[in-house]
Image (tube, rainbow, N blue to C red):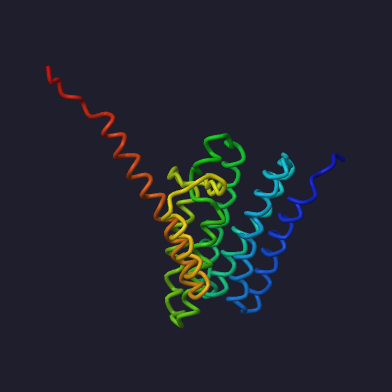
Amino acid sequence: MKKVYLLPNLFTTANLFCGVASICFASQGEFTQAAWILIAAMFFDVLDGMVARLTNSTSYFGVQYDSLSDLISFGVAPSWLIYSMALSNMGRVGIALIFVYIACTALRLARFNSQINDEEKKVFTGMPSPAAAGVLVSIVLLLHEYQIIEWIRFAPIVMIAVSYLMVSRIRYPSINRINLKGRQPFFYLVGAILAICMGVFHTELFLFCGFGGYLVLGFVMKFYSELQRKKAQKPVSNLS
């Protein structure tokens, strides 16, 4: 058997463990704990890729292992959380909803692995599965924090929306494009400080705004791209 890189795959394993743990907590009715564990899974998912790039330990095995772990943590676990909270009394409709979400997650991951290139590393085609799961999880946390849990009944609509976005052709920016080493405009630092303050004092609202904003960003990028395309196609008037 070929040797594997230890450190990044350990973070991937931690991601997988969080996904399984979240399913267990959701099954016991501990919904907020299950949601926070999935936030931890996203943290480990970012770390495994970051460590792999920094240590030059990216491998085919690691890519496949990461995708299988993501399917559990960002496909099965968040859909099971929503099912346990709001869909279990919907019978076959509830089962169909979580199946569609999990299937779209699997398709999104398979498409990413089969089409990965330099362009895909900069801009994702379709909403990444961790971000889609983040939308669901942040809604659960926000509604619980502000005691408006009855709004979870609208979760099926959100599930259908993010399921579509994962397999759509709408492009989303990759966090790999963020340059933390180079110089950046001063207001970037101010914005980062404000975001940290909001994250500390209003964590649930911060997560909801972050994941929700990322969801909307795909449509903003699409609109801007269409605008640029129409400008390029617009005939230039002859002034001579």
Q: Nearer the viewer, residue 156 or 149?
A: 149
Res. 33 image quadrant: bottom right
Q: Residue at x 56, y 34 (%)?
A: 118
Drawn side of residue 44 relative to residue 212, left or right: right
Viewer-proximal residue among 212 and 68: 212
Looking at the picture, tell me which residue is in the foreground, 90 or 8. 8
Q: Position of residue 42 (x, y in %)?
A: 61, 59
Q: Position of residue 54 (x, y in %)?
A: 68, 45
Check the picture and name the quadrant holding the C terminus.
top left
Side of 190 relative to 181 (left or right):
left
Place of residue 16 in the rendered image (x, y in percent of width and height, measured from the top left): 70, 59
Name the residue at the left extreme. Answer: 240
Left or right of 143? Residue 109 is right
Q: Quadrant of residue 171?
A: top left
Height in image: 24 above or below 59? below
Q: Is residue 108 above or below residue 39?
A: above
Residue that extends furthest to the top in the rendered view of this protein: 240
- Based on the displayed image, in which of its 4 quarters is residue 34 positioned? bottom right
Q: How many marks?
A: 0
Depicted 46 relative to depicted 233: above or below: below
In which quadrant will I find the N terminus? top right
Task: Tell me where residue 108 appears, x and y as whole percent.
Answer: 55, 47
Residue occupying the far bottom of the picture: 147
Residue appearing at x 55%, y 53% in the figure: 129
